[in-house]
Amino acid sequence: DDAESKHEESSFGAVINTGALMARWTNDHWKATAHRVIVPTAEAASTDRYSIAFFVDPDAHELIEVDKKFASGDSSCYDSITSSDFLQMKLNEMAGAARNT
């Protein structure tokens, strides 16, 4: 009767969303997740849900490259980019998406 093997509906759980920077570092081995909340039913909407956003970024001058553990030979899905250029690229993408809605 192993306590760890039991699952109860009221048990605590956590979901961790990885972002585009983690996808880039891992050559898409870890996918970026969509950051949105979808409430499927009114019943689900009536339950408590708590979210805590926590963002971590490298210093602006740091070079972002695919980690060699995730590269296939000498090829990767992404070119190297500084952290500040990566952030600016993502902000530009969001601004473009906002204009298109």
Image (cartoon, helix red, strand yellow):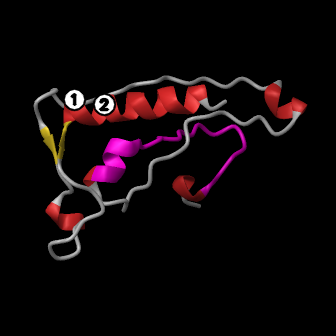
Q: Quick one: 71 or 9, which is closer to the camera? A: 71
The residue positioned farthest toward the bottom in the image shown: 73
Q: Quadrant of residue 27?
A: bottom left
Residue 80, x across and y down, in percent: 17, 50
Type of the residue with mark 1: Ser
Tell me the number on the disc at residue 19. Answer: none
Question: At 26% from the left edge and 30% from the top edge, which residue is drawn?
Answer: 57
Q: Is residue 28 above or below residue 92?
A: below
Task: List x then y, in percent, for residue 20.
Answer: 38, 44
Q: Which residue: 69% across, 46% down?
A: 8
The residue that appears at 29% across and 57% down in the rendered structure is 26
40 left or right of 79?
Answer: right
The Cα–Cα distance between marks 1 and 2, rounded to whole angstroms, is: 5 Å
- Read off the residue under disc 2: 87
Q: Whole-percent x and y of residue 9?
A: 72, 43
Q: Amino acid at mark 2?
A: Leu
Query: What's drawn in magenta, residue-wise?
Result: 6-24
Horizontal side, residue 78 vs residue 14: left or right: left
In the rendered image, the vertical position of residue 83 relative to residue 73, given as above or below? above
* Kind of element beneath mark 1: helix
Disc 2 residue crowd, few under 14, some 14–19, many 20+, Cα 10 Å: some
Q: What x and y, as percent, mark residue 46?
A: 83, 24
Magenta stretch encompasses residue 56: no
Where is mark 1, residue-wise?
84
Q: Residue at x 22, y 54 (%)?
A: 79
| Location of residue 1 by image quarter | bottom right
Instruction: List the single residue furthest toward the right.
Output: 42
Question: In the displayed structure, does residue 94 sit left or right of residue 65?
Answer: right
Q: Residues within 10 Å of mark 1 (few under 14, many from 20)?
A: some
Q: Are marks 1 and 2 in contact (CB under 8 Å)?
A: yes
Image quadrant in which the C terminus is located: top right
Q: Main secondary structure of the magenta part?
A: loop
